[in-house]
Image (cartoon, helix red, strand yellow):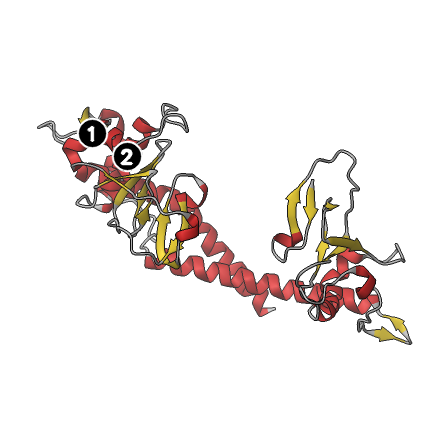
Amino acid sequence: MPATTAILTNNQIGKYLSRENATVLKNVFTATANGFGRAFYQPREFTVAQDSYAFTFKDKNIKIEKIHYFILSSLNKVYGRYNWGNKSGWNKVKKEKIKLPTTDGKIDFTFMENFVAELEALHVAELEALHVAELEAYLTVTGLKDYNLTKEEEEALNDFDKLNWKEFNVKKLFGSSTRGKRLKSADRVPGALPFVTAGEAEEGVSAFIGNDVKIFNSNTTTIDMFGSAKYRNYKYGGDDHIAVVHTEKLEKHAAIFVTSAIHKSSYNGQFSYDKNFYAKDADALSIKLPVKENGKPDYEYMAILIKAMHKKVIKDVVLFSDAKTSATKKIIAK
C-alpha cells in the first residue's frame, strides 16, 4: 500500500506498507506536516504514514478529480510559506485562507472544471507536438528515417538460415577484457560521464559522475556481475562489477551483433550474487559467430544483418511518426 510521508517527490509517496489494518484513502489531498510544506492530490488508494496528513472538501458532491490542479495551485501558495523552522501541521494550516473564483458570492466550481479541462487539452496537444517533433528529429539525425531495405540487406535476411557458424574465444578475438573499479555512491561527484554498474534498469547506468575515473571507449560491450551484456555507443566509467570487452575496432553494427552473441553465452543463469561474472570469465567465453569460407568471422555480414533488422524494427515507428505528425498538425491548427 503506497503511503505518504514528508517528502516533496514521487507525489509524496515515501513508503509502501501492509494493507492490513491500514486506513485506505483515495481521491483526496495530502500534505507534508514536517519540513518544507507542499500539498498533493492522490487519485489512487493509499494510506498516511508519518509527518503527513490527508484532507478533502466537507461537501462530498464536489468532484475533486476535475479541479484538483486549480485547488493545488491555491493551496501551495499557502504551503510554500512553511519550512523546517515553521512546520506545516494541520493545526496551523487549517486556519489559513485560499483564494478561489466565485460567481454571485459562491465558489464557481464549473469555471474551475472548464478552465482545467482547457489547460489539459492544450497541454496534451503541446506535449504531443513536442514528442512527435523530437521523434522526427531523432529519426532524421540517426539516419533511421529510411526504412527501405537495400538489395544487400534483403539478401542478408534471406541468407540467415544458410549461414555457417563457428565458436570463437572472446579473448582471442578482442584481447583481454578490462574490469571497472569500485566507486561508492557516497564518493560520486555529479557530472556528465555515465557510470555503469550491474543491473537492467537504465541499461545499468546508475549515475552521471564527474570523478576522475578510467574512461572506457564507445563501441564496446559491458558484461555485468550477472553475465548480462550490453552494447555501449558512448564513453563511460564502470565499477568493479563490470567487465569490458574491447570491440571498439569493429564497425558499430558488427559490434552490436557480437554483443548479442556474448549475451547469449554469458547470461544463462550461471552467474549470480553467489557467483559473480568477472573479466576473467569474459576472457574464457566462447561465442558463436557466422564465418566466411576461410573460417574467419564475417563481420561485414553481421553489420549488414543488424542494419536490416534496425530498418525492419523502425519501419512501424516511422509510419507511426508520420501519421501522428499529420494528426497533430490538424489538431494544433484547430
Q: Position of residue 124 (x, y in %)?
A: 60, 61
With respect to residue 280, does 132 lie above or below?
Answer: below
Spatial CA span between label 1 and label 2: 13 Å
Secondary structure beneath dot 1 equals strand
| Residue denoted by label 1 | 290
- Foreground residue, 275 or 157? 275
Q: Residue at x 61, y 64 (%)?
A: 123
Amino acid of disc 2: Leu
Q: Residue at x 17, y 32 (%)?
A: 171
Task: Name the quadrant containing residue 93.
Answer: bottom right
Q: Position of residue 50 (x, y in %)?
A: 72, 49
Say which quadrant the N terminus sits in: top right
Residue lying farthest to the left in this orientation = 294
Q: Is residue 328 left or right of residue 28?
A: left
Task: Name the quadrant containing residue 41.
Answer: bottom right
Res 297 visible: no
Say which quadrant the C terminus sits in: bottom right
Q: Is residue 31 left or right of residue 176?
A: right
- Foreground residue, 295 or 37? 37
How packed is label 1: few (under 14 Cα within 10 Å), some, or many (20 or more)?
some
Secondary structure beneath dot 2 equals helix
Q: Position of residue 247 (x, y in %)?
A: 21, 41
- Foreground residue, 175 or 249? 175
Q: Position of residue 16 (x, y in %)?
A: 65, 41
Amino acid of disc 1: Pro
Res 63 visible: yes
Pointer 1 or 2: first along the chain: 2
Q: Residue at x 65, y 49 (%)?
A: 13
| Residue denoted by label 2 | 157
